[in-house]
């Protein structure tokens, strides 16, 4: 699966990292979310992160 964060829209709020810290982390320099490498994803957590992103900027 290819996950993409629209970094032009991300505000670095941290919601996705709180929901699914194994996959999302904060880029301290840019103040935006980054995606960690992952072989497989927990669909429920991923859906939760996508649905709760206030900027709707996580796409798969
Ligand atoms: S929830 Fe959305 S806006 Fe907030 S840090 Fe994650 S990707 Fe960025």
Image (cartoon, rainbow, N blue to C red):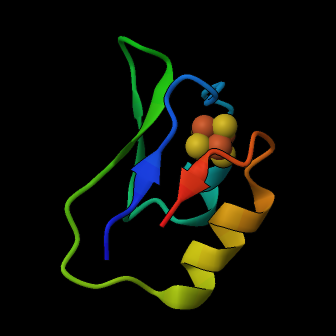
**Depth order, front residue of 6/36:** 6
User: Where residue 17 appears, x then y in whole percent?
Assistant: 54, 51
Image mark count: 0
- For image coordinates 66% across by 24% down, the residue present is 11
Q: Position of residue 56 (x, y in %)?
A: 73, 48
Q: Residue at x 76, y 66 (%)?
A: 51
Residue 16 in percent (x, y) is at 60, 53
Q: Residue at x 32, y 67 (%)?
A: 2
Image position of 29 with respect to 13: above or below: above
Picture residue at 75% right of the left edge, 39% below the top = 55
Which quadrant does the N terminus fall into?
Answer: bottom left
Residue 12 falls in which quadrant of the image?
A: top right
Q: Is residue 35 above or below residue 23?
A: above
Ligand 1, by image quadrant, is top right
Residue 13 is left or right of residue 46, and the answer is right
Q: Is residue 20 left or right of residue 56?
A: left
Q: Is residue 11 above or below residue 36?
A: above
Residue lying furthest top: 29
Q: 22 above or below 5?
A: below
Q: Quadrant of residue 3?
A: bottom left
> Can residue 14 be seen at all in this image of the molecule?
no
Residue 46 makes an appearance in the image: yes
Horizontally, residue 17 falls left or right of residue 40, namely right
Q: Quadrant of residue 36?
A: bottom left
């Amino acid at each position: 699966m290819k996950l993409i964060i629209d970094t032009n829209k991300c505000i670095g709020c941290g919601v996705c990292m709180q929901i699914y810290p194994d996959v999302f982390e904060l880029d301290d320099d840019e103040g935006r979310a980054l995606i960690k490498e992952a072989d497989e994803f927990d669909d429920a957590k991923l859906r939760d992160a996508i649905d709760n992103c206030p900027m709707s900027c996580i796409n798969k």
